[in-house]
């Protein structure tokens, strides 16, 4: 199909580039930039890593003299502040570009519209909102972190039709199909950390690494919620040394267990006086360590506690067409439960998709 050559045509290219950089910019957003002059592409740029050049810098450099009088497509409002790099709006002004098309405003309070304003003040035509929804979606994690300093929390589950994440016996290999499990690894790749409860470590001894054909080098931080510090020294996680391990516990945790885990290389963080890990404090602590997004891979207790504490931003559920029963088989969301249906947690912006014979349901939880 021939795509019409219009603003969306170029903005979607900028968004495609940004999309591919997901998972490698840390707490920074992913941003793409495309420069067009006289109906031809003259510059392309993507923000690749925190601390390195912004998307506009790469694109303007590539365009060289052709930036003058050009149209610049950028997926996020050009910045106006001196962060780790100088302001992009000044760069575009200096390059004498004619028009800037922006997909969405920068939610960063130090920018928040001031980049657009600065461009306009210098006589540059600015249009905002081309493919806005897609751009917002792309930087949801960044938006949450930069406005709250709390990491964006995605809960991912794989359950049976009757909501179980294992059989009565504990057997859980496998519930979801191979394609769904591959997607789960891609999801890991797009988060800065993976979080599990100690129950999952004791039951499955997971390595919590991203096994993806072309993403070997980029491993999320591994976080274990472990109130009583039951984490065993033999855990597989300690063996591979691929990425940092953070163990979240309470001030009541036994000092000698703490020392043992620290000697194995884990960072142990006390979150509240106990007896359970205070999850809100935990997220604050992780935010302070510049962890801006977390993929929670259960089990049911941690998932349930996060829901109850209203700390989940997105839920992604793979549901397999299996029914396993069992009174004691663990559920994907284990918590006390609501009393009236009117108090149920609901999913907004629901998306339903079929992944082979599995069903993928995702959305944003909302509390009444
Ligand atoms: C842009 N283009 O490509 C990106 C922007 O510490 P710094 O200098 O990297 O600044 C980070 C902030 O800059 C980040 O929080 C966000 O507000 C903006 N990111 N802006 O014009 C880009 N990555
Ligand atoms: Zn910038």
Image (cartoon, rainbow, N blue to C red):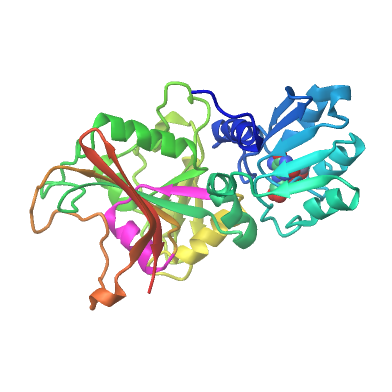
Q: Is residue 172 above or below residue 117?
A: above
Q: Is residue 121 above or below residue 76?
A: below
Q: For the image shown, how many numbered marks are present on the structure?
A: 0
Quadrant including the C terminus = bottom left
Left or right: residue 366 versus residue 32 is left
Q: Nearer the viewer, residue 342 or 155?
A: 342
Q: Is residue 150 above or below residue 295?
A: below
- The image position of residue 288, as x and y in percent, is 61, 56
Is residue 52 visible from the viewing direction of this image?
Answer: no
Q: Nearer the viewer, residue 227 or 167?
A: 167
Is residue 189 visible from the viewing direction of this image?
Answer: yes
- The image position of residue 263, as x and y in percent, is 49, 43
Q: Nearer the viewer, residue 345 or 44?
A: 44
The quarter of the image that holds ligand 1 is top right
- The image position of residue 3, as x and y in percent, is 55, 27
Q: Nearer the viewer, residue 45 or 26?
A: 45
Task: Please say whether residue 302 is one of the residues in the magenta stretch.
Answer: yes
Left or right: residue 141 versus residue 28 is left
Left or right: residue 307 versus residue 99 is left
Range covered by the magenta-colored residues: 293-310
- The image position of residue 33, as x and y in percent, is 70, 34
Task: Please say whether residue 355 is one of the residues in the magenta stretch.
Answer: no
Residue at image point 33% right, 64% down: 346
């Amino acid at each position: 199909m021939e795509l019409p050559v219009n603003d969306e045509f170029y903005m979607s290219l900028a968004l495609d580039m940004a999309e591919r950089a997901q998972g490698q910019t840390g707490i920074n957003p992913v941003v793409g930039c495309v420069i067009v002059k006289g109906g031809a592409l003259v510059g392309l740029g993507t923000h690749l890593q925190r601390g390195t050049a912004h998307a506009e810098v790469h694109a303007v450099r590539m365009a060289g003299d052709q930036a003058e009088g050009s149209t610049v497509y950028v997926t996020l409002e050009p910045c106006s502040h001196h962060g780790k790099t100088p302001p992009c709006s000044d760069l575009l002004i200096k390059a004498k570009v004619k028009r800037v098309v922006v997909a969405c405003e920068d939610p960063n309070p130090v920018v928040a519209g001031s980049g657009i304003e600065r461009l306009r003040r210098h006589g540059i035509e600015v249009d905002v909102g081309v493919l806005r929804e897609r751009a917002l979606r792309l930087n949801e994690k960044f938006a949450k972190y930069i406005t709250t300093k709390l990491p964006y929390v995605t809960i991912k589950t794989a359950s049976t039709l009757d909501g179980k994440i294992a059989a009565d016996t504990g057997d859980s290999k496998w519930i979801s199909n191979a394609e769904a499990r591959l997607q789960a690894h891609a999801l890991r790749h797009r988060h800065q950390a993976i979080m599990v409860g100690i129950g999952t470590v004791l039951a499955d001894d997971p390595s919590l690494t991203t096994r993806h054909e072309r993403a070997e080098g980029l491993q999320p931080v591994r976080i274990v919620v472990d109130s009583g510090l039951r984490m065993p020294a033999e855990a597989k996680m300690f063996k591979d040394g691929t990425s940092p391990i953070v163990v979240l516990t309470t001030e009541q945790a036994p000092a000698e267990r703490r020392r043992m885990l620290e000697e194995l290389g884990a960072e142990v963080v006390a979150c509240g006086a106990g007896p359970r890990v205070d999850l809100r404090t935990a997220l604050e602590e992780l935010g302070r360590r510049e962890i801006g997004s977390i993929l929670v891979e259960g089990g049911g207790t941690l998932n349930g506690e996060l829901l109850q504490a209203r700390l989940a931003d997105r839920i992604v559920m793979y549901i397999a067409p299996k029914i396993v029963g069992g009174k004691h088989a663990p559920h994907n969301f284990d918590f006390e439960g609501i009393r009236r249906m009117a108090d149920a947690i609901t999913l907004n912006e629901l998306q339903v998709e079929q992944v082979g014979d599995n069903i993928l349901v995702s959305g944003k939880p909302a509390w009444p």
